[in-house]
Image (cartoon, rainbow, N blue to C red):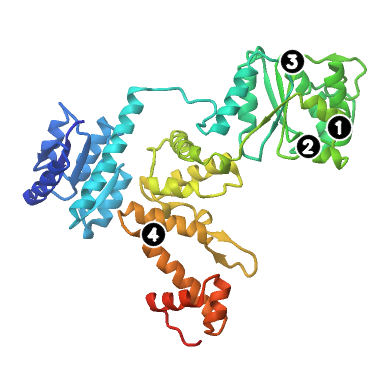
Amino acid sequence: MKPIWIVDDDKSIRWVLEKALARENIPCRLFASAREAIEALAEDAPQVLVSDIRMPGASGLELLSAIKEKHPGLPVIIMTAYSDLESAVAAFQGGAFEYLPKPFDVDNAIELIRRAIEESMRETAAEEEPQATPEILGAAPAMQEVFRAIGRLAQSHATVLINGESGSGKELVARALHRHSPRGARPFIAINTAAIPKDLLESELFGHERGAFTGAQTMRRGRFEQAEGGTLFLDEIGDMPAELQTRLLRVLSDGQFYRVGGHQPIKANVRVIAATHQDLERRVKDGLFREDLFHRLNVIRLRLPSLSDRREDIPLLARHFLAKSARELGVEIKRISEAALKYLETLDWPGNVRQLENVCHWLTVMAPAQSIEVADLPSDLREVRTGGEGAVVMDWVRSLEQEVTRRLAAGETSIGDDLTRQFESALIKNALKHTGGRRIEAANLLGMGRNTITRKISELKIDDRGD
């Protein structure tokens, strides 16, 4: 590991940090001015830079700019007095990893430097081992099953039905199936059957002849013809109107179709991949989907897990989407703290991977600092909204998880004892309030004995005004 560079004109600050880092066996190099550090950059670079803002001569912000020009991924911690908060904002805008307010706690400073070292190691590894972005990301067992299925189907022409919630990545899987198939060099055509009005869907799929209907001034090739030799992806197939289900079944059965208003059959050399978030078996039973078409489509079934069923993939996906958004917007990639990632893992994600991607795009634009914390997440992710008069309440389990994560990140101990006391106190206080102070009744409601509730009232110092 390269040394940590400490840049400060205050000798005592340099001395304190040097001794603290030495105790942790972390090498460091000291500079009394930003100019010295800028000159040293011509020959070397640190693992992490820790610099004061206000120094005689060149400022910490000038040093930050110089190091970001040569080493954009290198973490820089800016030290600043409380009166320099405007400078701290400028530091973040300049790409600082974090700022350390003076006077600082030495242990907190070392912990911050350790976080910056970990970030630096990740950046270095990414530079040394450039890899193409995978088509689909996922390390969870459920996603590994999907990857194995795609591999098994690599040489197949079979019709595939993909089941998965909205936003779970059905089109990505369909594209991967196409790309790795013998038809990979031919067109991949996608159509969302639920997004096109019923009256236009037939023409969209099969095309039309000139004069087939009012406004049909020229012949138009449909999606089946456009996908000739390749793959046609029919998304949300469960919403297809009944009459078009019949036409689709005929294409799958006979391998040919007619344009709207046409009389000449057209051969269809197309592999069909269909997808739906609905239970097609239920729709068949309800008479909303043709059973024979269902069996034609259901040759091979792939089930995609929801994001809540592959929570261990959330950190991987979040970092990927933050990097993707930064590239698209032409800005520096924002980092996300472990506490924020742990919190994201506790959410339900009804919009699945698409919702997570949208959140990461929002964070890239709206998060105020380069390092994203729980407090920076959109308010709708930190709150569960209920009906009534628009009241907003925190889901207590998620709130508890967030509190535990915060305390762990802060290095607190005896967390369980403290939270258990608060939890029991809240239970007993509210039970006594509900029973008008009658202990036996409150104990029965809580599932504990009278002696137990009496002892806990004493231990927890609960103001008990009744019996």
User: Mark 3 or mark 4, which is nearer the start of the sequence?
Assistant: 3
Q: CA distance from mark 3 to mark 2?
A: 27 Å
Which mark, by number, is residue 291? 1
Q: CA distance from mark 1 to mark 4?
A: 55 Å
Residue at the (58%, 68%) spot, across then down: 391
Which amino acid, mark 4?
A: Gly
Which amino acid, mark 3?
A: Glu
Front: mark 1 or 3: 1
Q: Are marks 4 and 3 in contact (CB under 8 Å)?
A: no
Q: Nearer the viewer, residue 458 or 383?
A: 458
Q: Are marks 1 and 4 in contact (CB under 8 Å)?
A: no
Front: mark 3 or 2: 2
Residue at the (35%, 56%) spot, across then down: 407
Which mark, by number, is residue 280? 2
Which amino acid, mark 1?
A: Glu
Q: CA distance from mark 4 to mark 3?
A: 63 Å
Residue at the (36%, 27%) spot, across then down: 126
User: Mark 4 or mark 1, which is nearer the start of the sequence?
Assistant: 1
Q: Badge 3 local density, few (<14 within 10 Å), some, or many (20+)?
A: some
